[in-house]
Amino acid sequence: MKFLLMSILTLSFYGMQAQDNLAQTTIQAVLTGNQAQVIQLAEAFSEEQYDWRPMEGVNSVGEALLHVAGGNYFLASKMGFAPPEDVDMMNLGKITGKENIIAALKKSNAFVLEKIVEVETAALNEEVDFGFAKMNKLGGLLAMMEHNGEHKGQLIAYARSNGVVPPWSK
């Protein structure tokens, strides 16, 4: 009986913990799906297609992917999470080569997924100045998710323009 009671109390505690981070874990789950599809698209483009751009002055495929990586670090840094020491933010956009770009994107994806759940629930309403807007930390987490989704759409358009079928829609 004591074991059953202790088990129920333990499960209740972990259930309450999950509820405490409901916004963070939900955003993390949605972002994980978006990130996976962006990586699938990145892998579906050929090395040569990484230099393709729809017109002059618009990001190429590779530049769009690096923009997402930089955005991940930028948004997280504004929320108090400095990029890893081995990430050179000033030269992130200069990375070349399909494999290197994908590696940089994967690293930034893992970084933000880890940091999302480190945002305390009690801090979600704290105001942050992102430079382009002032919003609370919950808004910042949603901006991370939206930014990745926005560029997933951009990359889908790039893929279709280059005869690349998004892998999940085959």
Image (tube, rainbow, N blue to C red):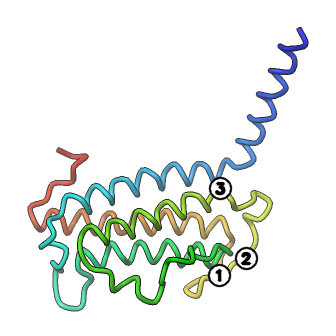
Q: Nearer the viewer, mark 3 or mark 2?
A: 3
Task: Specify the amino acid type for callout 2.
Answer: Glu
The amino acid beneath tag 1 is Lys
Where disc 3 sits, the SS reads loop
Disc 2 target residue: 127
User: Residue at the spot x=18%, y=80% of the render?
Assistant: 53
Q: Residue 117: which numbered mark, if any?
A: 3
Classify the position of the N terminus by image quarter.
top right
Does residue 98 sit above or below 53 in this rendering? above
x then y, percent, for residue 40:
28, 55
Residue 155 sits in quarter? bottom left
Crowd tier of the residue under label 2, counting other residues whose Cα lies within 10 Å: few below 14, some 14–19, many 20 or above: some
- First reached walking from the N terminus: tag 2 or tag 1: 2
Instruction: Find the distance from the CA under tag 2 to the CA under tag 1.
Output: 7 Å
| Alpha carbon separation for disc pair 3 and 2 | 18 Å
Say which of marks 1 and 3 sits in front. Answer: 3
Q: Quadrant of residue 92?
A: bottom left
Reading the image, the residue beneath label 1 is 134
Using the image, determine if residue 110 lies above or below residue 30: below
CB-based contact (under 8 Å), mark 2 and mark 1: yes
125 on left or right of 69 = right
**Kind of residue at disc 3:** Val
